[in-house]
């Protein structure tokens, strides 16, 4: 019996579980990312590999200990290291003595298809369509509510209420297996969240855009939940990357991408792998949209983000927007992060108040 | 025309310099090469870059800094891809942009930044040459002529490398025969190495062949009377074939050859040990190293990993090399 597992990335587990279960597979979700996951990953991964690889290894080990034997993983053809994750992880886990199969979803469709056929045998395309549709609706609902949560956290009436409602939503969403019920759940929770709207904690609206490497942007465990910390500090957060966007990007349906490339052109004139170009482009777009600041999130030694980080000071100066780069690795401490965020937000608030006084 | 064009003695210099030099010379430009990497150059580079950047790139910025007041143009190509499924480290792709932003507040001569992307069309190198020629308003005939000449020199360079010469010796040989002879005499027999050890040194050409960045690793090994081979001395087709052992083809061109080199040398009986050299923060190497390590453990090979950064000390390296050589000798005697 094939028991599937996959790495964690934010709330991707909900639609992924739905998809594979609808396809008729048994799914073993790795336990939530925790210090134990990270420790396992650190122990067995190459020292200078980036953080996502280490956490993935931790996820796989924990999942296989619970009985999983088939891993579904993303792939790629470079130049970002993510494209070779699968191969390295396979070697490491084999070396540790685990017996498993791994399916890498590569851009070479024929090869991937053959690989899937080899592992699973035949499957029905109708099932793929139906399961895919359901998963896609879940992702959309999830991201819509997530965006709303980011907007409402800095102006919630009662401290911590928004997060409580959000968690309830996520648990209920996982159980929804019909398109209509997903849609009605979304409307219901939209109403519930809107009711929590109050005054801004800081008196004025401070808007911060989050750009950077996708895994660290989406997975709250790696970024020590920056978005919640910012929300609690009274900051409206907008991210440049949500799971919907990522999947569109992966399947090459992303219509906004040309706009991003156009915005980045004066600073970075080439695709640099990963999301380096998006980081620059979106910083410019955030500046044009009147955001007060931008935070760049990246794992330590991430190659595309190092390029972006080298260029961002110039972008920040010419576009007149404050940028805070935050690099995460397994040793990043929470207290240091909070101090930096507080200082950054205070700076933005002062800047904005000065600007407002000028106009009055 | 007597424009001066600067070429940093760093990164791609180690792969293409003879060809580039001939090309610009035949175009009627004067080629200015930056000095060999030294402490001052590296420090100038470190000052202008973010901390996480790898060592060779930091030194590249220092070389640009050294050239900027001496030349009219600086040649900083943007290396995107060396053919289908042959990408390179992303830092090469963003290099001109990084240079531009690092030097915004200083006077930088115009950069010549052709896109080296060999995935597109026929004769991509020729198109790149034409693109560079357009920057100086040089007639197509002359560009073609210079390109032809450059190709010939570059071919000679490749043959020299494959004949077992280091890049430094090959370049010296192409420029001036005398220098090589002198260099060969300098080798001192510091320690009698009776066993005639043969060690493969695997690392990016721009790191291993830079005397300062690699802390003179190769010359140190030569002082111990060790025969040094590098992956540059092996035919590319062999490297590619050895790299096929990995079920998924590695997409970084230079690293595939490194990995292929490691797998190739692991199977050679006359290779006693392998030294893997990489720079702190090198992304592709961090992955390849792990794969080679796993494979090496299976085959019970002796592999020394050397990780270099701006704080590496020469004494520490020497001790490690000595210990490694002792170990290899003992292994060989048993």
Image: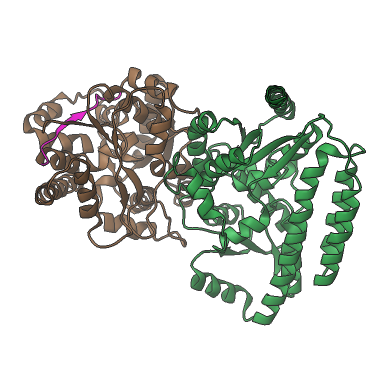
Chain colours: A green, B brown
The magenta stretch spans residue B34: yes
Identify whether B294 is placed above or below B328.
Answer: below
Relative side of B62 to B172, left or right: right
Residue A286 image position (x, y, % from top left): 61, 41
In this view of the protein, can residue B41 be seen by the observer? yes
Residue B87 image position (x, y, % from top left): 39, 52
What residue appears at the point 50 percent right and 45 percent down from the top-left corner?
A263
The residues colored magenta run B27-37
- Specify the principal SS of the magenta part: loop
Relative side of B226 to B81, left or right: left
The magenta stretch spans residue B263: no
Identify whether B234 is placed above or below B10.
Answer: below
Relative side of B153 to A294, left or right: left
Q: Nearer the viewer, residue B300 or A156?
A: A156
Identify whether A220 is placed above or below A345.
Answer: below
- Give the tally of numbered discs: 0
Q: Nearer the viewer, residue A110 or A166?
A: A166
Which quadrant of the figure contains the N terminus of chain B?
top left
């Amino acid at each position: 019996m094939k028991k599937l597992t996959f790495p964690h990335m934010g709330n991707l587990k909900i639609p992924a579980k739905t998809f594979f279960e609808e396809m008729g597979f048994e799914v073993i979700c790795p336990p939530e990312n925790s210090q134990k996951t990270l420790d396992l990953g650190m122990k067995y991964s190459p020292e200078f590999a980036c953080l996502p690889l280490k956490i993935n290894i931790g996820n796989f080990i924990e999942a296989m200990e619970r009985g999983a034997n088939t891993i579904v993983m993303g792939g790629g053809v470079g130049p970002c290291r993510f494209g070779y994750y699968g191969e390295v992880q396979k070697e490491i886990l084999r070396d540790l003595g685990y017996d498993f199969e791994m399916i890498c979803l590569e851009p070479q469709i024929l090869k991937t298809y053959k690989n899937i056929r080899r592992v699973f045998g035949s499957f029905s395309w109708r099932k793929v369509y139906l399961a895919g549709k359901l998963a896609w609706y879940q992702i959309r609902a999830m991201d819509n509510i997530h965006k709303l949560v980011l907007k409402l956290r800095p102006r919630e009436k009662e401290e911590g209420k928004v997060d409580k409602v959000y968690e309830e939503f996520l648990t209920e969403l996982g159980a929804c297996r019909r398109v209509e019920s997903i849609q009605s759940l979304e409307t219901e929770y939209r109403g519930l969240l809107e009711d929590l709207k109050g005054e801004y904690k800081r008196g004025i609206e401070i808007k911060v855009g989050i750009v950077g490497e996708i895994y660290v942007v989406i997975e709250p465990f790696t970024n020590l939940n920056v978005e919640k910390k910012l929300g609690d500090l009274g900051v409206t957060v907008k991210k440049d990357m949500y799971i919907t966007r990522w999947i569109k990007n992966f399947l090459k349906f992303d219509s906004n991408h040309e706009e991003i490339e156009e915005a980045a052109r004066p600073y970075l004139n080439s695709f640099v792998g990963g999301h380096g170009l998006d980081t620059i482009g979106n910083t410019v777009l955030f500046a044009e949209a009147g955001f007060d600041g931008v935070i760049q999130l990246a794992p330590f030694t991430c190659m595309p983000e190092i390029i972006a980080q080298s260029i961002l000071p110039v972008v920040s100066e010419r576009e007149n927007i404050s940028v805070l780069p935050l690099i995460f690795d397994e040793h990043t401490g929470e207290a240091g992060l909070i101090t930096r965020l507080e200082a950054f937000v205070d700076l933005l608030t002062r800047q904005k108040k000065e600007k407002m006084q000028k106009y009055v | 025309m007597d424009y001066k064009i600067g070429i940093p003695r760093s990164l791609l210099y180690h792969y293409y310099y003879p060809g580039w030099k001939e090309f610009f010379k035949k175009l009627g430009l004067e080629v200015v090469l930056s000095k060999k990497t030294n402490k001052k150059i590296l420090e100038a580079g470190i000052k202008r870059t973010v901390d996480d950047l790898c060592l060779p790139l930091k030194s590249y910025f220092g070389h640009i800094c050294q050239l900027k007041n001496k030349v009219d143009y600086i040649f900083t190509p943007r290396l995107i891809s060396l053919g289908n499924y042959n990408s390179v480290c992303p830092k090469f792709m963003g290099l001109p942009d990084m240079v531009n932003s690092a030097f915004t507040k200083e006077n930088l001569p115009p950069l010549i930044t052709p896109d080296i992307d060999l995935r597109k069309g026929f004769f991509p190198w020729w198109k790149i040459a034409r693109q560079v020629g357009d920057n100086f308003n040089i007639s197509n005939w002359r560009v073609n002529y210079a390109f032809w000449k450059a190709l010939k020199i570059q071919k000679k360079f490749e043959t020299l490398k494959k004949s077992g010469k280091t890049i430094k010796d090959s370049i010296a040989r192409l420029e001036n025969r005398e220098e090589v002879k002198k260099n060969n005499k300098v080798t001192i027999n510091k320690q009698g190495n009776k066993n005639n050890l043969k060690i493969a040194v695997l690392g990016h050409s721009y790191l291993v062949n830079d005397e300062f960045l690699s802390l003179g690793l190769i010359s140190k090994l030569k002082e111990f009377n060790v025969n040094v081979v590098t992956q540059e001395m092996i035919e590319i087709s062999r490297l590619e074939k050895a790299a096929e052992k990995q079920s998924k083809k590695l997409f970084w061109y230079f690293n595939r050859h490194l990995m292929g080199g490691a797998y190739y040398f692991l199977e050679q009986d006359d290779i006693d040990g392998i030294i893997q050299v990489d720079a702190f923060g090198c992304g592709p190497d961090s992955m390849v190293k792990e794969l080679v390590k796993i494979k090496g453990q299976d085959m019970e090979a002796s592999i020394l990993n050397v990780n270099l950064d701006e704080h590496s000390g020469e004494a520490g390296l020497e001790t490690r090399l000595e210990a490694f050589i002792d170990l290899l000798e003992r292994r060989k005697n048993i």
